[in-house]
Image: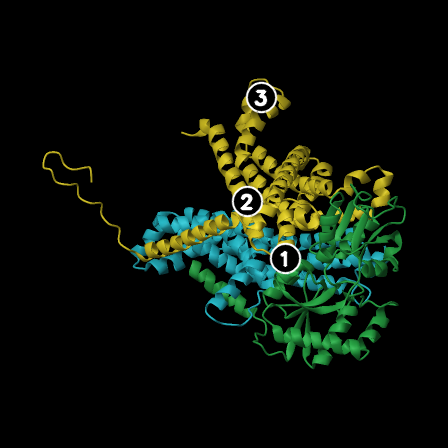
Amino acid sequence: MRILRLAAAAAFVLAGVGAAQAEDWSKVRIGTEGAYPPFNSLTADGQLVGFDIDIADALCAQMKVECEFVVQDWDGMIPALQAGKFDAVIASMSITEERLQKVDFSNKYYNTPPAIAVPKDSTLTGTTDADLAGVALGAQSSTTHSNYAEEKLPSADLKLYPTPDEYKLDVANGRIDAVIDDVVVLSDWLATEDGACCKLLGTLTPDPVINGAGAGIAIRKDNPELKAMLNDAIAAILANGTYKEINDKYFDFDVYGG
Amino acid sequence: MTAANPTTGTAAPPPRARPWTKSKILGHVLMAVWILSGAYLVFYLTTNIGSPFFARYWREYVDGFLVTLQIVSLSLLIGAAISVPIAMARSSSWKLLSGPAYAYVYFFRGTPLLAQTFLIYYGAGSFRPELQAVGLWWFFREAFYCVVFAFSLNTSAYQAEILRGAIQNMPRGQWEGGQALGLSRPVIFFKIILPQALMVALRPYGNEIILMIKGSAIASIVTIYDVMGETRRAYSRSYDFQAYIWAAVLYLMIVETLRRVWDRIEERLTRHLKR
Amino acid sequence: MNEALTLISFGPDGWGDEIASGVLITISLAIATLPFGLILGFFIALAKKSEEPSLRMAANIYTTIFRGLPELLTLFLVYFGVQIAIQQGLRLIGVETFVEVNSFVAGMVALAFVFSSYASEAFLSAFRGIPQGQYEGGYALGLSRFKTLRLIIFPQLIRLALPALGNLWLILLKETALVSVIGLADLVRQSGIAARVTKEPFLFFGIACLIYLVLAMISSFGLTRIEAWSKRGDVVR
């Protein structure tokens, strides 16, 4: 039975084999989430849009490679990268020590601080651990922001959600009292009709160990060529103005950061 | 060979060796695979007990276990309480009672627990003003209560069917015997029928408890830190696959222990039925 | 009410087409899992009724594991674990390719494991319902063990196991909902996306539940027909 089962499993797996390839980078598969506006999101008809997507397209054009996007849930992103589902993650993933133990990163392509948003009628005034003691605080699981909350805001009652959409629903209906995420993501949401429920409470000072050195492109550890290609391409689009063009399409400030 | 013949001093003949049939070979190979996997698992887990992963997360698994226990026991008890009127309505000959009860049971047994949990959790969130108006928001605000609520409704439908089946399968003679003794219907029901029916229903109840334990993993999807929730959190921080292995071992231990204890209970309670 | 109708309509403003595609995934996953689960379950039942104790024990371990683990956990174990195992296995034999276990395949494998361990019980009790004389009759006719099994036992077995298997099918249909958690765009996931975007969770999860109910009703109807068909040989007295 076991043999049969293995054979059957092998048959399914082979049926599900993606384009297998070795170290030939004429085609790069890019993993992204599609639930993190304005950086990456899906339109109603299933198109990927956002800053990350435009940057990825620009980088691929710069590297003269063909790119294919793969949509992957956030909490499975690094396992999927390790398993070879795609070759690079361009999904606003912060470069942190914890992640560097598992995967490699390109240089950063933007850097923005975390922030906290609360309902408009909230009585919260500060963003320190003492201010947030006992407060139901929502965050996307497996992010630097949830780690920040666990480490720096231990008195808050942290609730983890698979995507920002769920915590947005729950903070809007008052199930949670505050949410922590990237300041750009929160501001973008607050500016929409959905975000009318809430306001920005304050920006947090990033912790270099937890928040890392900005968002980079995650790749598997054994791909130095790809890393070099990506770093060169990032430098090139920063130099030739493509980056600024994309930046200005989405933001009225410099998202690359210091 | 202690069974030597005392009179002649010759050893007893050896037991007849069973031939190596195909199924024996296959069985031994499969068992070898299981034993090797089991040994590897034990080896893997014991070497990892000293790992930073275990040191960091074992407390969380204990907390998760307690949360799972709370969710399951609360849901089962509340579900049992709701199941009684439902089962009664369902067996009623009055269509106005049996119809809705049937619909209730059909709905909760015919749809996935996951969808029900989402429906209640996110659905309640969108009715906040209405729920606040009737003073129920404090209840639906908490994910824990929502989950217990959803699971209770779900298990009550299953338990109602178990109860109804067991009661209906009681032989008519039990009722008639009671009536012949001049007992009133409620007395017959509570003193004669129900105890026997519950005895018959022990096994399906045991299965329902196990289903509930397994189903409770769904709570992790709506921000609850039960065993599964803690597992997913640990995995999402460490990307260490042992997170899931520990969870599997924990769940298997819970379910197996429960199954064995339940078998014992059943054996003890039904010993008068054994011939 | 009109607003709700627009939301569930087909086309760019409505989510009807997305939900329909989710329904399709749900149904195809359940149908794709079924044959593997049935075949696996049948062989496990054979092992469980074998005279060979080691074979029985091996089969019992299998069912203990997959009936004891939460389905959600089995799904994660397969989705993440099998991928890692395959990758390490390939590295061991020196092959540097990437084999992808996509969420559909992972869901199918995990659900087939669970389904087969329950189906084996259904087959086993059906086996018990077939008198020994049926085997003996077959052997007396000079049929081989395999032919007896195929021509005499199997048709009766299916008839006896059908009601239980029908129940398992309904459970399988519901359990496919779990694959939404590993990212397969099934009915629950599509409804969830629609719910989040439109802020109408009650409407969309309600619709999802109703669709599951309709699928269950269609299945029950079909199962009744199949059961009637399987009993067409019964003697009418």
Identify the image quadrant of the N terminus of chain C. bottom right
Residue that label 3 marks: B179
Q: Residues within 10 Å of mark 3 (few under 14, many from 20)?
A: some
Which element type, helix, strand or loop, lies under badge 2? Answer: helix
Closer to the camera, B131 or C72? C72
Which residue position is annotated with label 2? B250
- Determine whether, in the image, residue B112 is placed left or right of residue A50: left
Give the label, 2 or 1, closer to the camera: 2
Q: Can you tell which chain is drawn green?
A: A
User: How far is mark 3 from mark 1, CA to CA?
Assistant: 54 Å
Q: Nearer the viewer, mark 2 or mark 3?
A: 2
Display colour for chain C: cyan
Say which element carries label 3: helix
> Is there one chain holding both mark 2 and mark 3?
yes
Distance in Å between CA atoms under marks 2 and 1:
22 Å
Q: Amino acid at mark 2?
A: Leu
| Colour yellow, chain | B
